[in-house]
Image (spheres, coloured by chain):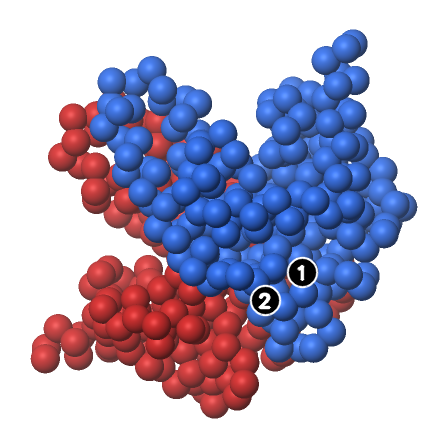
Chain colours: A red, B blue
Amino acid sequence: MPTITAFESSPDRGKGHARDMRVRWAFEEVGLAYDVRLVSFAAMKQPAHRALHPFGQIPTYEDGDLALFESGAIVLHIAERHDGLLPRDADARARAIAWMFAALSTMEPPIVELTMAMIFERDKSWYAERLPGLQDRVRVRLGELSHHIGDADWLDGAFSAGDLMMVTVLRRLHTSGLLDEYPEIAAYVARGEARSAFRRAFDAQLAVFTAASRS
Amino acid sequence: MPTITAFESSPDRGKGHARDMRVRWAFEEVGLAYDVRLVSFAAMKQPAHRALHPFGQIPTYEDGDLALFESGAIVLHIAERHDGLLPRDADARARAIAWMFAALSTMEPPIVELTMAMIFERDKSWYAERLPGLQDRVRVRLGELSHHIGDADWLDGAFSAGDLMMVTVLRRLHTSGLLDEYPEIAAYVARGEARSAFRRAFDAQLAVFTAASRS
């Protein structure tokens, strides 16, 4: 059974924004059991964890002799080896993988910059002047994505690993208010969150946070 | 023969930071001929181009009925179908792909934020106060990467698509001065740039810019 790592106590307080959520969701979609090893912030920066993850983060993935890091790579690894996350047609499969990269390289960076500024720059003198530009960078991408999705359920045909990554990236915007401006995107995110595999993954990561905050 | 798109006139003035460089380099490493269709900034935002790339960017990739976008996805597509960019051993192959994601998801975002701020926020009142934090975010990653590389030539065994992506991401730091602080990283980037496939790709994209600036 593969083992992943996750935060001992997630800084998002169980909202499912930590990147183990993507891997948990992928496991649930393909119906594969997995173990979770919890790590503290201190342990993540120690040599034992850095041997698995050179940048001292979570998640990692271990299965026999193979150790991987990067949530995108782990989800792709799972998706390539089990049915449920990638189409069988070669061209459709390549396009689904392109959407995984789009989620991580095109959508996620401006979203992370915005949400990080909303947390860490809120007290800075420049916050009010800088915020609209950060929001507009995200709006441009949301507008383009909304135009692409239109009235379709998913990004390209059936639900795929591309949707899984995209929904987890877009969920970070829940507290920003920006999703409300794009009803097609809000509905798309809600469709992802309504999947039973998502719910199981979400509940599993929330249970870790709840247990940690009780102890 | 596959066709990619590239800037008609690259904003980096031929320094090879536009993302077609990665795809050109991948083609050269595996010895595959390719066509390039140049697009203007205006044409990139039109429906015809957005049908290939929903976010109106370059590069795109077309081969028969298949159209792809996202440089990471295109490089992976090429690497999966031709020898030279991914190890044959399944575990080593998965690790090389993990390094592709690490280049794009962990290294590139703070590097792009820093280099964008150096261009677009230089005249802002907050630039001097904000710059050190942006530099330090990059330094943390460079330190971790430097520790990982040590005295090895490449990230994980032989040169792979992971190195190709990482070198193209790190090259953006040439004007920042930060590479000078990490001799192992500077040497790693130089090893990538010294590959004959890199040189051919670099010269090809430079020739486009040189021709455009003459006309």
Give the residue number, with chain letter if any, for mark 2: B156
| Residue A74 sits above or below residue B67 on the image | below
| Residue B68 sits above or below residue B19 on the image | below
Cβ atoms at labels 2 and 1 below 8 Å apart? yes
| Residue B160 sits above or below residue B130 on the image | below
Q: Observer-nearest residue: A47 or A53?
A: A47
- The image quadrant that residue A127 belongs to is top left
- The image quadrant that residue A205 belongs to is bottom left
Tag 1 subunit: B
Q: Around disc 1, counting alpha carbons within 10 Å, would you say few (fewer than 14), some (14 to 19), or many (20 or more)?
A: many
Asked if badges 2 and 1 are on one and the same chain, I answer yes
Question: Residue, x 61% and y 55% (percent of image)?
Answer: B163
Question: Residue, x 47% and y 41% (percent of image)?
Answer: B179
Question: Extreme left residue here?
Answer: A215
**Circle 2 SS class:** loop
On-image quarter of the C terminus of chain A: bottom left
Q: Observer-nearest residue: B20 or A207?
A: B20
Q: Give the x, y percent position of residue B24.
A: 75, 42
Give the residue number, with chain letter if any, for mark 1: B160
Q: Name the amino acid type tagged 1.
A: Ser
Q: Give the x, y percent position of residue B105.
A: 48, 52
Question: Residue, x 12% and y 73% (percent of image)?
Answer: A213
Q: Around disc 2, counting alpha carbons within 10 Å, would you say few (fewer than 14), some (14 to 19), or many (20 or more)?
A: some
Q: Name the amino acid type tagged 2.
A: Asp
* CA distance separating discs 2 and 1: 8 Å
**Circle 1 SS class:** loop
Tag 2 subunit: B
Q: Give the x, y percent position of residue A203.
A: 30, 75
- The image quadrant that residue B110 belongs to is top left
Left or right: where does residue B97 sit relative to residue B173?
right
